[in-house]
Structure formats: C-alpha cells, structure tokens
Image (cartoon, helix red, strand yellow):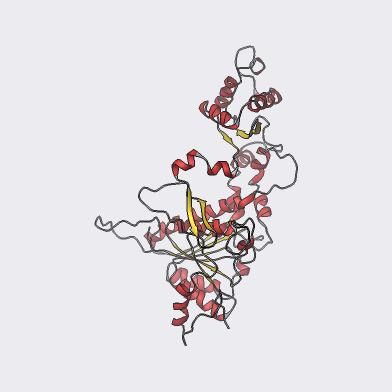
Amino acid sequence: MTDSPATPADSTRPLPDTLIDGVRVVELCDPRAGRVAAAFTGKLLATFGADVVKVEPPGGDASRREAPFATDVPSAETSATFLQYNTGKRGVTLDVTTSLGFRLLESLLDSAGIFLTDLERAAWPPGLPESVERRVEAQALLAVAVTPFGLDGPDADAPSAPLTVAHASAGPRNLVSGFGARGDEPMPLPAHAFAADAGLCAAVATTAALHERASSGLGQLIDASEMEAIATLDRVDTSILVNGPAMNTDRDPRDGMMECHDGFAFLVTGQGHQWRSMLRLMGDPGWAFGDDGEPRPRSEIAAESRSAMQEWVAGRGKAEVYHATQAAGIPTGPVLSPTEVLASEQEAARGFFEPVAHPIAGTLRYPGYSARFGDLALHHGPAPTLGQHNAEILAPLLAALPGGRTPASGPGIRAP
C-alpha cells in the first residue's frame, strides 16, 4: 500500500517491506483528556509501517501521567498506558495555540498523507479545519477524526469520559451481565479496552481509505465515533432488539462466568449441540431429558442447568475445564491473570509478545499484532520520549520558515 495513485502492475518493481509504505501520519490528540482511541489507531498504522509523528504539547500528553508505571518512580516516560498506545511513533512537542506552533503544524501537514486527531470539532485550533479541508482537496490528505460521539450531531461536543462513552453505546451490557454483575451501576474495564476497540475500527477504516486513494487519488474525511464503534460489539442484544422481543433481563443464567477450584472460566452453551455436549460431560443427568429421551426445553430447567454446570466446573481446574469443553465443541475461555497470559504456550509459539527496548522504561514485553502478513514486516519500536524528535523533525521546518529560526532550549518547542 503506497501513498500515491495506483499504476499498472509492474512485475519488476520491488514489493514493499511493510503494509503501509511511504505514508506519513501527523497525530494531534487532546492533551487534556487522556484519550487513547486515536492513539491506538496511530499505533496500528505505525505497526503497519507508516511514519507516525505524534504532536504533544510541551508538557506532554495526559496519558503520560496515568498509572500504572513501568518503574518504581513515576515519570512522564514510564506510564504503561502511554508506552503501550504509542509504540513505533516519533514524537515532537509543539504549542499549536501559538502562531509559530500552528505554522509548524501546517508545515508538518504539508508532507502528511494522513492527519489523525481525537479533538472534537469545537476544540480544533482556529484555522485548522480550513487548513485540513484545503489539504484534503489539494494533496489528497486523509483526515481521520476519532471522537467520543463523532464530529456532528447534537452530542458531538457533549462532555464525556471513557466510562460514559462505553455505556452510552450499550456495548458493555452483554459483557457486564456475562461476568455475573447484577446491579444497575455501570462497570468500567481497565486498560482502555473499549477505546482500543474504537481505535481498531478507525484503523481499519483508514487502511480501507488508503486503498481507495491508491485508485482514485482523492482525499477524504473519516469521521469515527467511539460510541458507535463500541455499539457494534453488542451484537446479541442488538439482534434481539431488532428481530425479536426486547431483552429486559440479564444474560441467560446457564452461561457465563463460573468458578473453578483455581479461578474462573467463561462457558457458552447457547446452541443446541453445545448444550448436548455439556450434558454428556456431566454424565447425561436424568433431569435434563424428557420421557422421549430428548433434552427438555432449557427454559424449563434453567436453575438445574446452572447448578449442575457450576458443580461440574467447581470440581476442576480452569485448564481442565477449558480443554475438556473445547474438545467437546463448547466455546470456553479460562480467565487468566496478566502473568498467566504472558506465560501462555500458545502466545509464545506465535511470538505474540514482542520485547521492545525503551531508553528510560527499559526492555518490556508488549502485545504484538494478532495477524501475520507473510513476509511483510511489522514495526514494534518504542514509544517516543517527550520531544525526542524535535531536532530531527522540527528544526528543519523552523529553519525553512521566513527568517529561519533555531529550536528553543528545553524539551519542547514553543513560540516566544
């Protein structure tokens, strides 16, 4: 995938080493909110081979101050959140609220194929919407906005937080009930899990737009709503609401989280063949069958089903439950601690966790990408330190401005 319109196939032309070849991404995220959906989009594009330049204010992105930290002494360089969601990028510090800072941002955009932001429309610096729109037309720029509720509509600029965005989508409903929560209070998930889902959706849309641009040569705006992306995860409830009676109760008690003697496992036996396999594992108890020898309707034996499954699971370890049910065709997953995931033989065999060396946080193992692409390489570089690439990226742009300047001292470049 290249940053230019497609040309007729040339069998003599060398194939690119990466999925995205020769594309620069300028990432400008809200420094106050600590959001990570757009940052995850940028991380994925960097993993695929794009040159992602993250623009932070001189004080750094808010996610740099989010616990936990990779070292005993918290610092802007050791936040696990920032380290994870910004691998493979280059980073500069820039005060875009000043005239000089904005001119430098525009200079960066001059060489960009993609502009990525999580700023709601009202928060864009003055002049930026017009500058981006002009570049969409003139240089086929892809402008990608990943915001809580999208760039338009009555809720576009509504106050938000990760918890409220997730639950406004109804996406967590199945997950919450599946984990056994029965209260009315909203349930948060750690590590920005829902934001990562939204960032992935935006990355897929962006790569599709890159493919389209290779044919048409045209730029466009990609307006991604976190809430709408998360809503697509609630496929079961959404299907019931559209195709059948409204679901007003929690998830069916026959499925979900169950306690083993060494932890928990999550079982799904909703389909007929899955339930029949579960009955075999439990010894075909008599209460589960009618006089004709066929399984009774599950609605008649819900309480017995749950009790019997819990008893069967409780007498086994989660690994035994996992292997026995999987062999019987029952979708099951053990609930693993982070330590157990890192020690997984399956992930070790696939090389999923990649060691990445960071100059301050040290060498840590990071989740890689879930798919492989033949001989194409994936990039797993460290997250940038604050202002790490100012001299490399911004200094030449400063020198090229009328009356050429040199970078100010300190970790950031800001207008005098």
Q: Is residue 237 left or right of residue 351?
A: right
Outermost residue toward the front in this view: 72
Q: Position of residue 256 (x, y in %)?
A: 64, 34
- Residue 249 appears in which quarter of the rendering? top right
Q: For the point 35% across and 56% down, which residue is it?
A: 17
| Residue 306 shows in the view | yes
Q: Position of residue 262 (x, y in %)?
A: 64, 33
- Residue 60 appears in which quarter of the rendering? bottom right
Q: Nearer the viewer, residue 251 or 39?
A: 39
Q: Nearer the viewer, residue 346 or 194?
A: 346
Q: Is residue 307 left or right of residue 398?
A: right
The quarter in which the C terminus is drawn is bottom right
Q: For the point 53% across and 73% down, which residue is it?
A: 130
The quarter in which the N terminus is drawn is bottom left
Q: Position of residue 160 (x, y in %)?
A: 68, 59
| Residue 205 shows in the view | no
Outermost residue toward the top in this view: 291
- Residue 111 appears in which quarter of the rendering? bottom left
Outermost residue toward the left in this view: 12
Q: Is residue 230 above or below residue 349?
A: below
Q: Position of residue 229 (x, y in %)?
A: 57, 51
Q: Nearer the viewer, residue 242 or 30?
A: 30
Q: Is residue 181 above or below residue 104?
A: above
Q: For the point 47% across and 68% down, which residue is it?
A: 136
